[in-house]
């Protein structure tokens, strides 16, 4: 049964309860299906799910209370309402937002692609990827190969009769290999995201992962000193971009936990840096037509030509910080309403990858930032275990591992020297590789 | 009872009838209570989660499905979606298990009553005390989380197990600020069993340490980088063993020969001074369990004895594939994950050295007084973790505090570099993330001295 048919019938009951207690309500619910085919060595380990979730916020003047439940029954919803009222009673942070009015949303199936692919087809693709990486070289084993199909429906209603729904569908592919010889071991990981199977090339994915494991097998530990570093777009670059935008969270700024709190409208990054949040992008895994408070989503500039243009705000944080409301409220299961980006896009630059490599005699290309425990979420300082490759000009000289790269995230994006002229997509980011001239590498 | 015995029997028998070698149904309900104080204001949130996970084995193939819909029709639908994954169609069908009788009944205890007003006042008092330490303290975050979890596990081997798992977790996070620079300190406490537990003085001491750490880090210089001796402190310092070795001893990887320890059973893998255990029986510790998530009794498992690898940690599938005995290590975050072999309370046993002796042994090195999180690639054994509070050691004495250090190394290599193990064992709670989700664990050790490690930092 469609999610809106299931839940709309409760709107009157909720209204009646709220009227009695003089409260307003917002209900944000989802239903998610997934099917995953996974090969671990030769063994198939597959899974499927059918999951539903309701978040409920009740408000009175400027006070709010939250609760959640996993059952769509009226009885559970009433229990959830009672818990939300308890939450309101014991909560003294006055974070009530603005109730969204009825508004025009994008079509509910904007991001949904009816894949019309059978489970058999999915299993076959998984096998093909697995086989391509397993047979590439005898020094390479495939640890896991998985294809996950997801179909999600989201639904929102509030006591102002706002009502919205949208669907999303995604296909995620993961392939992980292990390189082994007599002296060394290496791991490689390849993650891809598609909207349908028509663009999928199983052999290419499998061979790419296996080749990477083989390339990394003869790694060396670099000498400790400062190097120019290129962060590779789809992996290291995307991770750094997400880490940076976390500091743009309106919630973090409000709570005095962001190093960007005093930087709005200031030029604090490289001239060449522009970053956008694009919730309506059809390619993204985090696409949405409305946010956690039911406001219609839109593209938001976060950084333009090095200037911090916006924070990620919900209605409350926008009001409290006196900054634009960018409609980025999002629900985190069993935590409550937070603010978050959706799909992030970093504008491409003007240099080819080869051009960036030849900017200095020796350049380290980092393709994997592994140790995010070494990232300080308050100061932005980091010292992160990494993997990559040493280049001299366009010649790949050596695979590198067991080293750390250190610095501060604001300095990274301030000191970008060049950005690649091509963008690369991962599930929810579009980024380009970028060159930073002088970073501390600690190895031997 | 969350799901009736007859529904469980019907689901399991239906799976066996359709050719499965093994079927398990895991039912879970949990109520979470979260009280958080931030910016001197309290937020409180409570919610209910429930769901069912069904797992099938066809020899060494494993299929899993989960749903929030607990009625028989939905469970059968979920089961049938799973059976369609079994690519080579099964010709033979097994007869249903006539002796599958679940006669054991259990009433779960009532949900724990918590005095929310009292707790709110306590957090407000902690906030006041924290900020009174120094005008440089700009933010205090306190989190009190309680989870009241009830599980029911039934399988085709006539196991029917009920477990009540209450969890209590407290976390403090302090931010100090000066001249637009911020640093933080942290501390935590986690217990199972009595979730009305609120030992105010213990929590107060935890907070004091976090405040001091934040203030110290604010004044500290960046850590030098390089390779030198490192002393890792007791308690959460045990995360080094958890990452460097523990994950590699889980049969999830060992069974596939993808762990660096796969072929090392009975061999020397660490210094003589290292003995280590994974113990699910410790009363009240955050990683303790009565039954594992397959309904198997927990136990104390010796992993390393005087440097020699003695055991791996197994779940049912891991044991089936490796033939190593079951150790009761099957764990999962919740019904959304099939269980795999995971650590419980994992620690290095105490040795004979004092911390002072170790410090005196070091001419120039790092004392990692407190560690943050870490991670490992079990296939290579390469691990990393963050030092959240550190001091330089110069000429056998503790010198100035340093910040921004991380430690990296390789498990097999590092275990052999442990030169001394202290006599003061301490455990500390944490959350471990792996393929079966995040599970509560404790890590632990006495202080240990490593001859050298790669210390990542910003200064050469």
Image: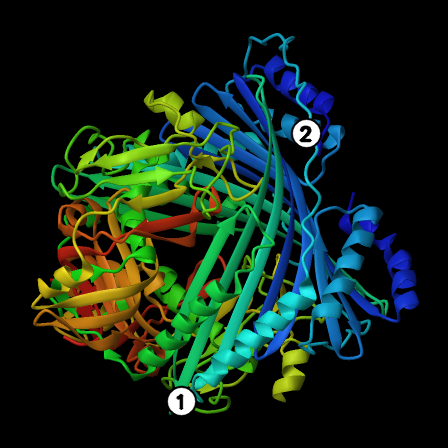
- Position of residue B99 in the picture relative to residue A133 (left or right): right
Distance between the alpha carbons at the discs numbered 2 and 1 = 58 Å
Considering the numbered disc 1 on the image, is that residue within a helix, a strand or a loop? loop
Residue A444 x/y as whole percent = 11, 62
To which chain does the residue with label 1 belong? Answer: B
- Tell me the quadrant of the picture where the C terminus of chain B can be found: bottom left
Residue A354 or residue B281, whichever sits in front: B281
Name the residue: 14% across, 52% down.
Answer: B420
Name the residue: 44% across, 25% down.
Answer: B316
Residue position for label 1: B180
- Tell me the quadrant of the picture where the N terminus of chain B can be found: top right
Residue position for label 2: B106
- Going from N to C along the chain, the mark reached first, 2 or 1, is 2
Residue A422 or residue B260, whichever sits in front: B260
Residue B313 x/y as whole percent = 35, 33
- 10 Å crowding of disc 2: few (<14), some (14-19), many (20+): few
């Amino acid at each position: 049964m469609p999610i809106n048919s299931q839940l709309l019938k409760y709107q009157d009951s909720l209204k009646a309860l709220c009227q009695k207690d003089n409260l307003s309500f917002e209900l944000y619910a989802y239903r998610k299906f997934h099917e995953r085919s996974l090969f671990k060595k030769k063994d198939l380990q597959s899974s499927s799910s059918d999951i539903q979730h309701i978040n409920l916020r009740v408000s009175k003047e400027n006070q709010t209370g939250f609760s959640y439940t996993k059952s769509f029954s009226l009885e559970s919803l009433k229990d959830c309402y009672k818990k939300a009222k308890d939450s309101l009673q014991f909560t003294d942070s006055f974070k009530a937002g603005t109730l969204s009015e009825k508004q025009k949303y994008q079509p509910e199936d904007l991001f949904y692609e009816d894949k019309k692919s059978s489970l058999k087809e999915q299993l076959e693709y998984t096998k093909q990827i697995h086989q391509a990486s397993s047979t590439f070289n005898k020094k390479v084993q495939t640890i896991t190969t998985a294809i996950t199909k997801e179909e999600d429906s989201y639904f929102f209603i509030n006591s102002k009769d706002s009502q919205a729904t949208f669907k999303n569908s995604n296909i995620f592919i993961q392939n992980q290999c292990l390189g082994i010889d007599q002296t060394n071991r290496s791991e490689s990981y390849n993650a891809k995201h598609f909207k349908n199977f028509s663009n999928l090339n199983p052999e290419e994915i499998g061979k790419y992962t296996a080749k990477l494991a083989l390339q990394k097998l003869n790694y060396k530990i670099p000498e400790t000193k400062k190097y120019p570093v290129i962060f590779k777009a789809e992996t290291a670059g995307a991770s750094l971009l997400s880490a940076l935008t976390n500091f743009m969270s309106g919630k973090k700024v409000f709570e005095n936990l962001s190093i960007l709190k005093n930087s709005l409208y200031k030029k604090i990054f490289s001239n060449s840096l522009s970053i956008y949040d694009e919730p309506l992008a059809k390619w993204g895994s985090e696409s949405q037509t409305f946010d956690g408070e039911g406001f219609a989503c839109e593209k938001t500039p976060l950084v333009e030509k090095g200037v911090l243009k916006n924070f990620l705000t919900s209605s409350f944080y926008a009001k409290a910080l006196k900054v634009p409301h960018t409609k980025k409220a999002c629900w985190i299961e069993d935590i409550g309403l937070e603010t978050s980006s959706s799909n992030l896009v970093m504008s491409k630059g003007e240099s080819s990858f080869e051009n960036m490599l030849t900017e200095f005699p020796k350049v380290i290309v980092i393709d994997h930032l592994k140790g995010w425990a070494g990232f300080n979420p308050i100061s932005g300082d980091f010292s992160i275990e990494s993997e990559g490759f040493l280049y001299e000009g366009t010649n790949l000289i050596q695979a590198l591992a067991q080293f750390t790269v250190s610095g501060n995230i604001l300095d990274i994006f301030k000191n970008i020297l060049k950005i690649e002229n091509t963008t690369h997509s991962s599930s929810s980011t579009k980024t380009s590789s970028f060159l930073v001239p002088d970073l501390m590498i600690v190895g031997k | 009872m969350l799901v009736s015995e007859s529904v469980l029997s019907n689901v399991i028998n239906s799976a066996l009838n359709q050719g499965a070698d093994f079927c398990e149904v895991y039912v879970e309900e949990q109520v979470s209570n979260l009280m958080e104080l931030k910016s001197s204001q309290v937020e409180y949130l409570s919610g209910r989660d429930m769901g069912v996970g069904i797992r099938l084995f066809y020899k060494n193939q494993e299929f899993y499905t989960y749903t929030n819909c607990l009625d028989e029709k939905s469970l059968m639908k979920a089961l049938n979606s799973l059976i369609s994954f079994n690519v080579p169609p099964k010709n033979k069908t097994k007869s249903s298990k006539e002796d599958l009788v679940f006669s054991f009944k259990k009433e779960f205890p009532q949900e724990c009553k918590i005095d929310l007003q009292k707790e709110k006042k306590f957090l407000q008092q902690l906030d006041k005390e924290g900020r009174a330490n120094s005008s440089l303290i700009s933010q205090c975050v306190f989190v009190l989380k309680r989870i009241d979890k009830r599980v029911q596990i039934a399988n085709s081997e006539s196991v029917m197990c009920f477990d009540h798992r209450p969890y209590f977790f407290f976390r403090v996070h302090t931010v100090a600020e000066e001249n637009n620079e911020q640093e933080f300190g942290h501390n935590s406490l986690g217990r199972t069993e009595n979730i009305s537990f609120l030992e105010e003085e213990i929590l107060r001491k935890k907070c004091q340490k976090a405040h001091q750490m934040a203030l110290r880090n604010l004044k500290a210089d960046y850590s030098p980088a390089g390779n030198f001796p490192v002393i890792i402190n007791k308690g959460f310092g045990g995360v080094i063993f958890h990452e460097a070795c523990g994950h590699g001893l889980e049969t999830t990887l060992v069974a596939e020969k993808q762990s660096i320890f796969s072929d090392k059973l009975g061999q020397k893998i660490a210094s003589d001074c290292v003995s280590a255990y994974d113990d699910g029986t410790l009363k009240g510790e955050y990683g303790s369990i009565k039954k594992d998530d397959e309904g198997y009794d927990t136990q104390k498992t010796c992993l390393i004895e005087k440097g020699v690898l003695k055991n791996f940690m197994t779940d049912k599938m891991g044991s089936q594939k490796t033939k190593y005995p079951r150790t009761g290590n099957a764990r999962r975050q919740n019904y959304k994950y099939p269980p795999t072999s995971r650590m419980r309370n994992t620690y290095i046993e105490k040795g004979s050295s004092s911390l002072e002796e170790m410090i005196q042994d070091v001419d120039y090195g790092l004392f990692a007084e407190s560690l943050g999180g870490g991670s490992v690639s079990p296939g290579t054994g390469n691990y990393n973790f963050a030092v959240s509070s550190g001091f330089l050691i110069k000429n056998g004495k503790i010198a100035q505090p340093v910040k921004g250090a991380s430690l990296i190394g390789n498990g097999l290599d590092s275990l052999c570099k442990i030169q001394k193990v202290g006599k003061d064992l301490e455990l500390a709670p944490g959350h471990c993330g792996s393929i079966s989700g995040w599970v509560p664990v404790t890590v632990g050790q006495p202080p240990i001295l490593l001859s050298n490690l790669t210390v990542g930092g910003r200064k050469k």
